[in-house]
Image (spheres, rainbow, N blue to C red):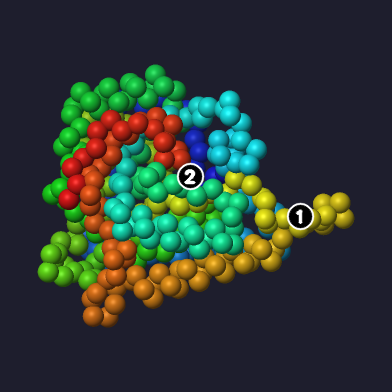
């Protein structure tokens, strides 16, 4: 499986009860002096640096093609295998995007599809942002053991946590690498705070929310085995499942690179065009206004979704869904 920015693969490993270790989200909060503006800059730096690195890699003349997700290829690619079953089971807490964010994603997907129709696009009903991944790549018995442990401690106080702890995300932008694309956000730091929310409220950021949910899981006796805890708030919106549309016909027979670098460049240019539009239309204005679609308070419409199963691509089963704001 491709090791992209948004979906690092891992080997199956049981999650066991262990002594509580340091919360991996705490250091960034501490180093940022609990300042939302500093936290926002860290999120901004992460995604802008990553995009710049990936752009250079993808536009390099030596670029050999997209990093295909081999499991997704078997499930949804043009040569799918109807007998294949994803062996990886996961246990997660997801944040579900509200309708206005789903609408924005649909608009972006249509624009990308115009230049890259062979991509696999995440269906709107499956869109999600991983707030905390408890475990991944498990067998079903390993997964059920974790779910049972969490159930014994109670779940409602976790999935309903966003009712009283509302983190706001802003500045949508497409982040990408050679395997996937995502709509990413950064924590708000007082921008566009209006009648219904104070700038003070933004001191509780999405990174604080992730820290708190981690602590609650640890208190339940679970050793969290997340694949990553980088400063990122993103919804995966598309993945590469084929090289179709990005290869030059007859190139292989002539001993040349099969990659159609012009088509690759066209896709990157489209992403950058969309990002300029997002910044112009959906980022906070000087007067503080934010267009609908440019702001997401985590927990809008639905609380956190405690979910299990084969959910790498939006599937799985909801165990308990929290109350929405």
Picture layout, residue 278 above or below residue 250: below
Circle 1 SS class: loop
**Residue at 39 percent of width and 53 percent of height:** 234
**Residue at 12 percent of width and 69 percent of height:** 195
* Screen quadrant of the N terminus: top right
Picture layout, residue 92 above or below residue 64: above
Q: CA distance from mark 2 to mark 1?
A: 26 Å
**Residue at 21 percent of width and 40 percent of height:** 322
Picture layout, residue 259 above or below residue 312: below
Circle 2 SS class: loop
Query: Which residue ends up furthest to the top in the rendered image?
Result: 141
The residue to which callout 1 is attached is 258
Horizontal side of 5 relative to 64 (left or right) equals: left
- The front one of 149 and 180 is 180
Horizontal side of 302 relative to 114 (left or right) equals: left
Residue 224 screen position, x and y as percent: 33, 35
The residue to which callout 2 is attached is 7
Mark 2, other Cα within 10 Å: few <14 / some 14–19 / many ≥20: some
Kindly indicate the quadrant of the structure image that contains residue 155.
Answer: top left
């Amino acid at each position: 499986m491709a090791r992209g920015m948004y979906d690092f693969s891992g080997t199956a490993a049981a999650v066991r009860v262990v002594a509580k270790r340091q919360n991996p989200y705490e250091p960034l909060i501490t180093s940022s002096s609990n300042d939302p503006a500093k936290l926002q800059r860290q999120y901004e730096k992460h995604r802008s640096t990553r995009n710049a690195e990936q752009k250079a890699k993808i536009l390099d003349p030596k670029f050999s093609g997209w990093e295909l997700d081999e499991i997704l290829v078997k499930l949804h690619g043009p040569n799918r295998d109807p007998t294949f079953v994803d062996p990886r089971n996961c246990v997660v807490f997801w944040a579900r995007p509200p309708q206005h964010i789903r609408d924005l994603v649909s608009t972006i997907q249509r624009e990308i599809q115009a230049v890259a129709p062979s991509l696999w696009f995440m269906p709107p009903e499956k869109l999600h942002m991983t707030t905390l991944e408890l475990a991944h790549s498990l067998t079903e018995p390993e997964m059920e053991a974790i779910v049972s442990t969490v159930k014994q401690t109670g779940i409602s106080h976790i999935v309903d946590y966003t009712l009283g702890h509302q983190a706001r995300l802003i500045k949508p932008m497409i982040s990408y690498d050679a395997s996937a694309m995502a709509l990413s956000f950064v924590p708000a730091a007082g921008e566009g705070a209006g009648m219904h929310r104070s700038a003070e409220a933004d001191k509780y950021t999405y990174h604080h929310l992730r820290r708190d949910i981690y602590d609650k899981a640890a208190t339940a006796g679970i050793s969290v085995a997340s694949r990553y805890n980088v400063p990122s708030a993103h919804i995966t919106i598309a993945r590469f499942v084929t090289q179709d549309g990005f290869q030059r016909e007859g190139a292989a027979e002539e001993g040349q690179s099969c990659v159609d670098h012009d088509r690759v460049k066209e896709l990157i240019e489209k992403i950058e065009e969309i990002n300029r539009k997002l910044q112009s239309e959906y980022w906070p204005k000087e007067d503080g206004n934010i267009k609908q679609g440019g702001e997401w308070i985590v927990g809008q419409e639905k609380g956190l979704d405690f979910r299990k199963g084969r959910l790498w691509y939006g599937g799985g089963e909801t165990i308990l869904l929290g109350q929405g704001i």
